[in-house]
Every structure is written in C-alpha cells, then in structure tokens.
Image (cartoon, rainbow, N blue to C red):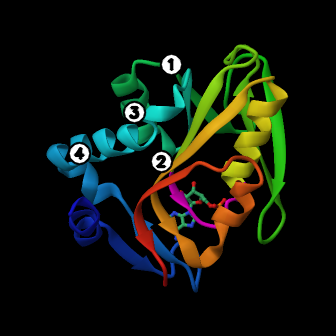
C-alpha cells in the first residue's frame, strides 16, 4: 500500500526546528520519481470529483506536489507565499502561530471570481496555515473545493479547523500519534 511505502521513506527529525517538534522530512521522497508519480496520481484521484479550476500551493513544500498536481490535472498553479515575497499586487491574510503571528499573500489577479480551488500543502498540523489560505481564496471571491495534504498529523486536530471552511479534506499519509 502506497501509504506504508511512503511512511518508510519519510524521515523523522526530532527537535527540528525547535525542541519537542518531530519534523516530518519529505525530501527523501523526492529522490524516488516513481513514488512522486504515484503520490501525484493518488492525490489527484482523491480530488477528481470536485472539478477544480486551480491548485493553490503553500510555500514552500506545498509547491513540490502542488505544481505536479496542477500539471497533472491541467489547471493553473497559484503560489501562496510568505508576506513580502510576491512581486506584484497582493492580497494578504494574517494568522496566529503558537508564539506570535504570520502573514501569507497571493497575487490579487491570480483567481477569477467563483473559481473552485484546491488548497495543497505537504503537511497538515494545526491547520492554521491552510485556514489562512482558505481566507485568501474567499477574499478573492473564489471557493475552496477541497484541501489536499501529503501528510496529516491527526493528533494536532487541524481537520476540525478546516472543516469549518470545507468538508472535503484529502490526506494520503496519516499519523494518529
Ligand atoms: P499548521 O499551520 O500548524 O497546520 O502547519 C503546517 C505547516 O507547517 C506546513 O506548511 C508544514 O510544512 C509545516 N509543519 C508543521 N509541523 C510540521 C512537522 N512536524 N513536520 C514538517 N512540517 C511541519
């Protein structure tokens, strides 16, 4: 089963980027083109009923499979970046972190009104980042059709936060502890 194969490849890095966090390093997956292809196929397959118009990928690891997914599904890819990185006019959304806050941006002309969007990131933890991306989609007059994550840390309850935005949350590799 693909999920088990991927779990063998993901590398746990304890205490990164700070003590107490076990970082799920997905970079070893990128060395296996066959696995990358299967991941793209499965994540695209999970979302096939939503008839999406665009994939939004969240900086920076959300760009990896986000762009492949958009290419596979033959829809535009839209990068969501940390504040101050995108060159053109942007719309911005601030959100709370464990300590302090962060802001993400999208180009103001990236989405047409009424577009149905898939929000993709490599990993779902508390859901704060993806929920902020959902707010950007709404600010642009578009609609979140589904969320898509390669990895989900279910014990951090991110899904509960995202269910307030959209009922369709697709996750391929699931950790319950
Ligand atoms: P959150 O907003 O809490 O859902 O955090 C999600 C974002 O933080 C994603 O962009 C992930 O890449 C990153 N992230 C959070 N926790 C981890 C972790 N344990 N391992 C790898 N990335 C993480």
Residue at (76, 16) in percent of width and height:
113
Q: Is residue 124 magenta?
A: yes
Q: Which residues are magenta?
A: 122-128
Callout 1 environment at 10 Å: few (<14), some (14 to 19), or many (20+)? some
Q: Secondary structure at mark 3?
A: helix
Q: Secondary structure at mark 1?
A: loop
Looking at mark 1, is its residue's CB closer than 8 Å to ligand 1?
Answer: no
Instruction: Kindly report the distance in space between the C-alpha atoms of the residues bearing marks 4 and 3.
Output: 11 Å
Residue at (29, 64) in percent of width and height:
3
Instruction: Kindly report the distance in space between the C-alpha atoms of the residues bearing marks 2 and 4.
Output: 18 Å
Marks 1 and 4 in Cβ contact (< 8 Å): no
Residue under circle 1?
Answer: 76
Looking at mark 2, is its residue's CB closer than 8 Å to ligand 1?
Answer: yes
Instruction: Kindly report the distance in space between the C-alpha atoms of the residues bearing marks 1 and 3.
Output: 10 Å
| x, y percent for residue 22 | 49, 79
Instruction: Kindly report the distance in space between the C-alpha atoms of the residues bearing marks 1 and 4.
Output: 21 Å
Residue at (34, 26) in percent of width and height:
72
Q: Which mark is residue 38?
A: 4
Q: Secondary structure at mark 4?
A: helix
Q: Secondary structure at mark 2?
A: loop
Q: Which mark is residue 67?
A: none
- Marks 3 and 2, the one that precedes in the sequence: 2
Q: Which mark is residue 69?
A: 3
| x, y percent for residue 122 | 47, 52
Ligand 1 quadrant assignment: bottom right
Q: Which mark is residue 61?
A: 2
């Amino acid at each position: 089963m693909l999920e088990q194969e991927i779990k063998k490849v993901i590398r746990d890095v304890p205490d990164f980027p700070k003590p107490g966090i076990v970082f799920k390093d997905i970079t070893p997956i990128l060395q296996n083109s066959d696995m990358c292809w299967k991941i793209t196929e499965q994540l695209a397959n999970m979302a096939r009923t939503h008839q999406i118009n665009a994939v939004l990928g969240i900086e920076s690891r959300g760009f990896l499979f986000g762009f492949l997914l958009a290419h596979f599904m033959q829809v535009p890819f839209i990068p969501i970046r940390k504040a101050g990185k995108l060159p053109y006019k942007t719309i911005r959304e601030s959100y709370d972190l464990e300590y302090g806050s962060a802001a993400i941006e999208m180009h103001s002309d990236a989405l047409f009104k009424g577009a149905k969007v898939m929000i993709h990131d490599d990993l779902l933890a508390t859901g704060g980042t993806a929920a902020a991306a959902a707010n950007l989609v709404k600010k642009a007059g578009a609609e979140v059709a589904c969320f898509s994550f390669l990895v989900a840390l279910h014990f951090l309850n991110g899904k509960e936060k995202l269910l307030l935005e959209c009922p369709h949350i697709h996750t391929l590799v699931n950790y319950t502890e």
